[in-house]
Amino acid sequence: MYKDDKLTDKWWKNAVIYQIYPKSFKDTNGDGIGDIPGIIEKIPYLKSLGVDGLWISPLYLSPQVDNGYDITDYRMIDPMFGTNEEMYALIHEAHAAGIKIIMDFVANHTSDQALWFQESRKSKTNFFSDFYIWKDPKPDGSEPNNWGSNFGGSAWTFDAGRQQYYLHYYAAEQPDLNWENETVRQYIYDMMRFWKSKGVDGWRMDVVTSISKNLDFPDNDRDLVTSNQQNGPRMHEFIHEMNQEVLTPCDMMSVGESPAAKASDAHLLVSPEREELDMIFTFEHMHIDRKQGDINGRWALQNRDLVSLKRILSDWQMALRDNGWNALYFENHDRARVISRWGNDTTYRYECATAFATVLHGLQGTPYIYQGEEIGMVNADYDLSDYNDIELHGNYDHYVRRKQSISHDEFMRAAYKVSRDHARTPMQWSNDKNAGFSDGKPWLKINPRFSEINAKADMASERSIFKYYQTLIQLRKNNKIFLEGSYELLFPDDEHLFIYKRTLHGETWLIVANLSETMIDSPFENEKAEMMITNMGRRTLSEQLRPYEAFIARV
Ligand code: NOJ
C-alpha cells in the first residue's frame, strides 16, 4: 500500500493534463497569433478529449525574445493574447467545465525589459541592485567564469552602465534572478498568491532546479557547457520555502522542470515528506537519441535506443512508487513530435501515435498531452530561415558558425529531428486556410501536411487518434489499476517491444506495444485475455505483433 493512501484526494493524480502553447493554439482576431478567446472557444474540444487540467505556456507581458519565457510583468497578460479580464474569464469558463488551470511559473529569470532589471542595471546601490546576479569582470576584463548560455555563447553579458557582468542561463535578454535576495523571493511568492486569487490551480515551474546558484562560480570543466547550472546548494531550501509560503497554504499543484534529475535523486524533490514539489519533468528519457557527452550537445544525435527508454521510464516508475509521483510526457513546446523523432510519421502515423500514447498512459503518474499530439501532428522540416526559435538560431551560430564543431548539414539533420519549433507550428484544426488556426498570416509557418493532418479530418476518420486518446483517458479514469497498480517491466532487453504489467488486488493488465516497423512474434501463449483498448482490433495475445501495434489487455 501507499504511504500516502489519500491518493484520490489529490486531483492531479487521477488527472490528464493538456499543454497549450497559446501563440500557436487558436487565433480569433486575425493577427496570426493565438489568443485567450481562442482557448475559450476550444474548451468544448478539450472537454470532449477528457482532460482535467490545462497547463498554459506563458501569456504574461513579454517582448517574446523566447516566446514568453522572458517576462516583463508577471501580473499582466500580454495584449497579443488578450486582457487580464479575458484570462480571468478563461479560468472561470475552464472551471465551469471541470478543468483546472496551471500557469507557467518562470522565476529563474525575467525579461531584461522588466522594471526590476531596468532599475538593477542603473547602479550598485539601489533597491533593485541585488535582484539579479552581477559580478565584476576578471582583471583582464573577461567574463567571471566560463559558464555557457543554453542558447549559445557565454552566460555573462557586460553592462556598460554598471561596469559589471550579469548572469543569464538563457538569452542575454533573460537575466537570472538572485534568489539569495529574500525580497526577490517574497515578490515572487506574492505574484503566485495574486494568481491564486484569480483562481489558478497550480504551476508548471520553468527550470526551477536552476534557481540556486553556486556562489563560488567555479569554471565548468569544458568551455561553454552548462554543467554547473543545475541543483545549486540552496535549491531544496528555496523550493521548500516556496512550498510553505505558497504551494501548501494556497493548495496549488506544482510540476517542476528538472533537467538534471535522475530517478535515483528525484524523491528529494517530490517525496511528500519533503514538502517541495508534487511532480517533476525529467529529461532523462529525452536523451535516448543523444550522444552523451558530445561537444555539440543536443545536436549530436544517434538512433533512439528503446532499451534505454524502457529502463529509464521503469527506473522512474520504481523510484517514485510510494515516494512521490511521476509526470509523464513525450512532447511539449521544447520537444519535437515523438512520432517523427522516434517513430514513423508517414506509413504508420496512426499506429505510431497510438502506440506511444498507450505506453505512456499505461504508466503510473500524471500524463501530459501536448497540443496536436492527440491528432498525430508531425515535425515540420523548414529552411533554417523559416524557423523562429532563439535556441535553434543561437546554437547554429555557436556550433556551426563560430566553433565549426558541426557542419550545416549535420546540424540541420539534427534540427529536423529535435528543433523546438516542430512543436510550435500552429495547431491544425481543419483543412481550411491556415489550417483553421488564423485568418491572418500565422506567426510561424503552418506545417505543409495540414490538409492531411488536422483535428477535423482526424475526428471524422475511422482511425482517429483523438478518439483513441478519448478511450485511453476514460480507461484510466475508470480503472484504479492505472492509479495504484504495481509496475513490472517485461523483456527489458527486447529492442522492439515495450511490454509491462500493472497489477492490483491480484488482477493483472498488460500494456503492450511493438515500437518497430517489423512483424514480431508474440511472447505470449495465453489466448485468454480481454482487450481493453487496441489500435488494430487485436483479439488474442498470441498473434504476431504488427508494426506499431499496441494494446492493453486484462489477463
Ligand atoms: C524551459 C522552457 O520550457 C523553454 O521553452 C525556455 O526557453 C527555457 N526554459 C527558458 O525559460
Image (spheres, rainbow, N blue to C red):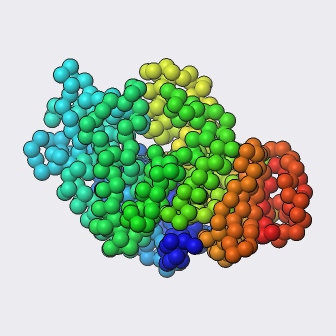
Q: Residue at x 90, y 57 (%)?
A: 543
Front residue of this view, candidates 445 and 302: 302
Q: Quadrant of residue 50?
A: bottom right
Determine whether, in the image, residue 104 is placed left or right of residue 499: left
227 or 124, nearer to the observer: 227
- State the image coordinates of residue 159 (x, y, percent, origin top left): 21, 33
> In which quadrant of the rendered image does the N terminus lie?
bottom right
Estimate the x, y position of residue 519 in percent, counting from the top left.
86, 47
Q: Is residue 220 above or below residue 505?
A: above
Residue drawn at x 21%, y 48% is 131
Examine the rendered structure and indicate whether residue 411 appears above or below residue 79: above
Residue drawn at (76%, 45%), measured in percent from left and top?
494
The image position of residue 171, as x and y in percent, is 36, 39
Please give left or right for residue 474 compared with residue 79 in the image.
right
Check the image and name the residue furthest to the left. 125
Q: Quadrant of the C terminus?
A: bottom right
Residue at the outermost bottom position: 96
Is residue 389 in view from this perspective? yes
> Residue 232 falls in which quadrant of the image?
top left
**Residue at 69%, 65% in the rendered image:** 502
Left or right, 365 with reference to 152: right
Q: Nearer the viewer, residue 122 or 1?
A: 1
Q: Is residue 180 above or below residue 304?
A: below
Is residue 371 in sight in this rendering? Answer: no
Question: How far across and down, in percent of the image, does residue 250 sit?
Answer: 34, 73
Count of marks placed on residues:
0
Of residues 510 and 249, the one nearer the viewer is 510
